[in-house]
Image (spheres, rainbow, N blue to C red):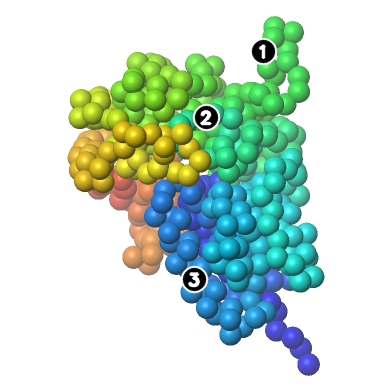
Amino acid sequence: MTTSPRRYHITTFGCQMNKADSERMAGILENMGFEWSEDPNDASLILYNTCTIRDNAEQKVYSYLGRQAKRKQEQPDLTLIVAGCVAQQEGEQLLRRVPELDLVMGPQHANRLEDLLQQVFDGNQVVATEEVHIMEDITKPRRDSKVTAWVNVIYGCNERCTYCVVPNVRGVEQSRTPEAIRAEMEELGRQGYKEVTLLGQNIDAYGRDLPGATAEGRHQHTLTDLLYYVHDVPGIERLRFATSHPRYFTERLIRACAELPKVCELFHIPFQSGDNDILKAMSRGYTQEKYRRIIDTIRRYMPDAAISADAIVGFPGETEEQFQNTLRLVEDIRFDLLNTAAYSPRPGTPAALWENQLSEEVKSDRLQRLNHLVNVKAAQASQRYFGRIEEVLVEDQNPKDPTQVMGRTRGNRLTFFTGDINELKGKIVPVKITQVRPFSLTGEALSVACC
């Protein structure tokens, strides 16, 4: 009698770091003989990889969990796991709220999933949220794409922004060695991947914790050095990196991006607020003037670079006038993409305890006004692509129109054009842009490039 394979399902909430962690954990489960199941109700192991940046993401996790906890009462052999930032923050409290859980594990424990599951299968309920040294990524992630891949270069964050829960849940900064990063990229190149995004919660801090400084006293491991070191990995045609912090963004890094042909002209640099007093209350460590200087420097080297950012409205104590300073920054800089959020108090952060919280009405009104401006400015920024020829790396079929394929320009604009995915997937195609929308483009392929 053959036994059917055990099946697993992972639901991922939140940021790119979480997606990268989920891919690694999926790789571990497949090594253990599990098979992926699209439908969580067919799976005997369910893992929620969670995010705690905003309250609604957290609530969603609890509602998903509730459904599976009920199912577990009828199917006791169902394994339920909560991983990621909510797990790190809530720890044992999660077990008290949802006693059906088998394993609660923080993001630093992603590579230990097999050992932790072994303890679960031995009959234990396990909470793994203690600080650990990140083990080198020996796992082969089960990557969702065959064309683009994430590569983690630094975990954790040493910043102490007053609104942010990340340092509490992802721990202190730990950089991987340049050799390990390059080895992972070489393997991706051999597997046919064309684009790599280097990831870190605060990627400009890369290397500060690695031993070794040069005679001039400059650290020899910086993000800039890393870009030079991995730039020529065979097979990888494009390099991106995220997320940057304005405090550490140097002209040397900008110059490297301009000099190195594979590094895409795209910069994701959150500014959070356009008002200096609010930036100070957030403990961001820079002024809006400094932020503007960074953008000016980028545009001096690469006039056409795409720039995206994150912004928070309704931070405790924010006045209408201070909010107007944020609008002014957005008006002046013309971002290609801006992730916006109304401030949401997070447990364990200083700002959550302050008395001067704003009402939900004020927050949502400001968010709507900001979003309206973002859409107007993004539509204007998009106009520059009309009639241009852009290089598009083809990733997939257009789910809404099977005659079209979709991919991204070097500036990360989603672009659609007519073509056969079987022939074009993973190719870089010159596309003449015939239609522009605020956040995506449509065009016609000129010819299929050889690469």
* Residue type marked 3: Gly
Quadrant of the image containing the N terminus: bottom right
Query: Which mark's residue is nearer the viewer, 1 or 2?
Result: 2
Local secondary structure at mark 1: loop
> 146 above or below 399?
above
**Does the CB distance between marks 1 and 2 fall below 8 Å?**
no
> 331 above or below 2?
above
Pick the residue in front: 299 or 9: 9
Residue farthest along the bottom direction in this orientation: 1
Residue density around tag 3, few if under 14, some if 14–19, many if 20 or more, within 10 Å:
some
Residue farthest along the front direction in this orientation: 355
Left or right of 242, for residue 382: left
Tally of numbered tags: 3
Q: Name the residue carrying label 1.
A: 218
Q: Residue shown at 46%/34% (left/top)?
A: 350
Q: Residue shown at 60%/50% (left/top)?
A: 88
Q: In the rendered image, is residue 426 in sight?
A: no
> 373 above or below 220?
below
Residue 84 pos. (x, y %): 58, 52
Q: Residue shown at 74%/54% (left/top)?
A: 112
* Residue type marked 1: Arg
Residue 253 pos. (x, y %): 53, 21
Sequence-earlier tag: 1 or 2? 2
Left or right of 322, for residue 83: right
Mark carried by residue 160: 2
